[in-house]
Image (cartoon, grey):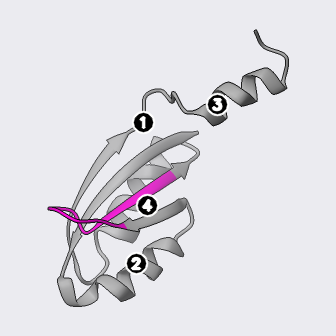
Amino acid sequence: MVTAFLMIVCEPQRIHELGQALADLEGVDEVYTTTGSTDFIAVVRVPDLDSLATLITQKVATRPGIMRTDTHLAMRSYGRNEIQAAFDIGLD
């Protein structure tokens, strides 16, 4: 499983419509509007890098109103959920 954070810049007048459209895409788990130089941050979880490339280049970047994307791959997670999951399956 590949997890990525997709920073998206779009035309301001399309923020509302694009937010829901992005959230409806397969592989997009969460979409947040943000302040600053990025309009959206999308949390993406897909099976492999090919799926990620297809999602970004064919389903996100080509959507009318999207001006720019910047993709950041997750390397390692340090969240509480992962630590708790390890204890739940008996890892020490």
Distance (Cα) linking label 3 and label 1: 14 Å
Question: Do the residues bearing badges 2 and 4 touch, measured as CB atoms within 8 Å?
Answer: no
Identify residue type, mark 2. Gly
Residue 81, picture quadrant: top right
Q: Is residue 83 above or below residue 10?
A: above
Q: Position of residue 47 (x, y in %)?
A: 58, 45
Q: Which residue is mark 2?
A: 19
Q: Which residue is mark 1?
A: 74
Toward the viewer: 64 or 3?
Answer: 3
Q: Is residue 5 above or below residue 61?
A: above
Distance (Cα) linking label 1 and label 4: 16 Å
Of labels 2 and 3, the one closer to you: 3
Q: Which residue is mark 4?
A: 55
The residue positioned 51% from the left and 62% from the top of the image is 30
Q: Which residue is mark 3?
A: 82
Distance (Cα) linking label 3 and label 4: 26 Å
Distance (Cα) linking label 2 and label 4: 15 Å
Quick one: label 1 or label 2, which is nearer the N terminus?
2
The residue positioned 25% from the left and 69% from the top of the image is 39
Of labels 2 and 4, the one closer to you: 2
Instruction: Spot the residue most to the top.
Output: 92
Of labels 1 and 4, the one closer to you: 1
